[in-house]
Image (cartoon, rainbow, N blue to C red):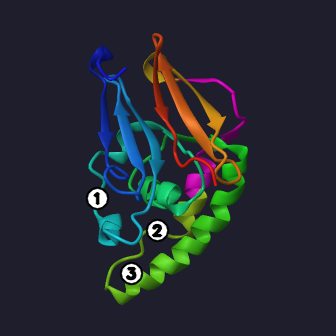
Amino acid sequence: FTKMKNSTLHFYGAAGMVTGSNFVLDTGEGKIMVDCGLMQGMGEEDNWEPFAFDPASVSHLVVTHAHLDHIGRIPRLVKLGFKGQIISTTGTLALVGPLLLDAMENLGASAERHGKDALFDEDDIKNALKLWRGIRYGEKLTLPDGISFELLDAGHILGSAMVRLTREGRILFFTGDLGG
């Protein structure tokens, strides 16, 4: 998969650690993200660092589930220029609004204690939700550069999904978190 058409998979979190899930597949024609999570417990200061890529260059963000280490930086991604489509299951979409509002309050208190600006605000959350689309498990969609994808039940929390990306018979699979 990653050898076709100069595709490269970048790991910006949850590689060698269990927090801050954030992957970008650069297909050569565009960029597709899987998850955009907060660093929790270790490396929390990294949440305020700029993304290692231009958020505006990403066309789609696919979300595995609603835990903050998978969704917690999405409003910041939008604040910094992401205007693409966010896709998750409908169950995940139902959870993200309240969870992000709660995180905003906690992160705001942390930012204040450390003399930093808020990571994101309520408008950033609203703007992210405007870009969000919920789909059913097994529903197949087409992304740029001939990639199709579907979400499969991960059995972790309500709406949790594994992401299967397919192109020219090759499959790239993101499990998110499995089971309970």
Report if the CB atoms under discs 2 and 1 are less than 8 Å apart.
no
Q: Give coordinates of residue 5: x percent, y percent.
A: 30, 15
Q: Residue at x 43, y 60 (%)?
A: 76
Q: Residue at x 55, y 35 (%)?
A: 163
Which range is magenta?
Answer: 127-142
Q: Is residue 170 above or below residue 121?
A: above
- Quarter of the N terminus within the rendering: top left
Using residue 130 as the reference point, say whether residue 70 is left or right of it.
Answer: left
Local crowd size for mark 2, using a 10 Å CA cut-off: few (<14), some (14–19), many (≥20): many
The amino acid marked with disc number 1 is Pro
**Quick one: label 2 or label 3, which is nearer the N terminus?**
3
Q: CA distance from mark 2 to mark 3?
A: 10 Å
Report if the CB atoms under discs 1 and 3 are less than 8 Å apart.
no
Q: CA distance from mark 2 to mark 1?
A: 13 Å
As for residue 131 lying within the magenta part, the answer is yes
Most foreground residue, 49 or 172? 172
As for residue 72 lying within the magenta part, the answer is no
Q: Residue at x 30, y 65 (%)?
A: 46
Mark 2 element type: loop
The disc at residue 50 is 1
The amino acid marked with disc number 2 is Phe
**Quick one: label 1 or label 3, which is nearer the N terminus?**
1
Of marks 2 and 3, the one in the foreground: 3
Q: Residue at x 42, y 68 (%)?
A: 40
Most foreground residue, 137 or 76? 137
- Quarter of the C terminus within the rendering: bottom right
